Image (tube, grey):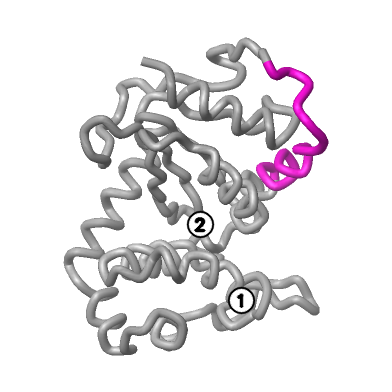
Amino acid sequence: MRTIRCLAALLALFAFTGVSHATDARWVEGRNYDLIVPAQPTRVPAGKVEVVEVFSYGCPACNQFQPIMAELAAKLPKKAQLVFVPASWNPAESWPLFQRAFLTAQILGIAERTHQAMYDAIWKTGELAVVDPSTHQLKRPQPTIGDVARFYARVGGVTQQQVLDTARSFAVDMKMMESDELVKAYAVEGTPTLIVAGKYRVNNSSVRSVDELIELVLWLVNRP
């Protein structure tokens, strides 16, 4: 079911074509965005507005969403700060492994420079692929934490042992639990999903273009 929601999000994403024709659109609660009740604490400095992407490296829609995230990041005001929350709900396609991988990279301080490379390793080069490109079936076996450690050692400037020790640490286990709790508190049903200020959940399917999506996020960033 979660995979279907990820693919549904991908189809919605493909609807982002052309230029927005609603530059002065009035965004409607319950249609364009939903309130998160109760609002969730944010993890950014005082005075900053948190913009979260709930994602998984194993989600094809999230992979396709990366150029949009790059465009959004370039247009966010200085008071906004991007935060990434990895989801784990699809164990058949290694989402818990990729959640652990992202949080490991975060603790090691290499997440920013390995983020796109991880997507590429799964969906472009096949180094960490979860699906066989010729059969379109799930690969057996799926990638392991050892595979991730070798990948991070190659692209992240850390050792395999550093990755393994961190990935198996209590700190990462706790961060995984916190991420799962946040995803549940946000009431996220598919990925990618954007959350603004811990209060607003963006409905991607309600907008007609990338321009509109960015306009909506910026509008939410500037809300009280």
Q: Earlier in the sequence, mark 2 or mark 1?
A: 2
Q: Position of residue 92 (x, y in %)?
A: 54, 65
User: Nearest the camera: 35 or 137?
Assistant: 35
Q: Position of residue 22 (x, y in %)?
A: 73, 18
- Is residue 177 shown left or right of residue 18? left
- Quadrant containing the C terminus is top left
| Residue 113 to residue 191: above or below | below
The image quarter containing residue 212 is: top right
Q: Position of residue 90 (x, y in %)?
A: 51, 57
How far apart are labels 2 and 1 at the CA level?
Answer: 13 Å
Name the disc covering residue 56, or none.
2
- Is residue 76 shown left or right of residue 8? left
Give the magenta part as a residue range. 8-23
Q: Amino acid at mark 1?
A: Ala
Q: SS at mark 2?
A: loop
Q: Amino acid at mark 2?
A: Ser
The answer to if 79 sits in the magenta stretch is no
Name the disc covering residue 129, or none.
1
The crowding category of the residue bearing disc 2, from other C-alpha atoms within 10 Å (few below 14, some 14 to 19, many at least 20), is many
Q: Main secondary structure of the magenta part?
A: loop
| Residue 129 to residue 214: above or below | below
Residue 145 showing in the rendered view? no
Image point (35%, 32%), residue name: 49
Image point (38%, 47%), residue name: 83
User: Nearest the camera: 142 or 149?
Assistant: 149
Residue 117 showing in the rendered view? yes
The crowding category of the residue bearing disc 1, from other C-alpha atoms within 10 Å (few below 14, some 14 to 19, many at least 20), is many
Image point (68%, 33%), residue name: 211
Q: Position of residue 142 (x, y in %)?
A: 54, 78
| Residue 174 to residue 104: above or below | above
Q: Residue furthest left?
A: 170
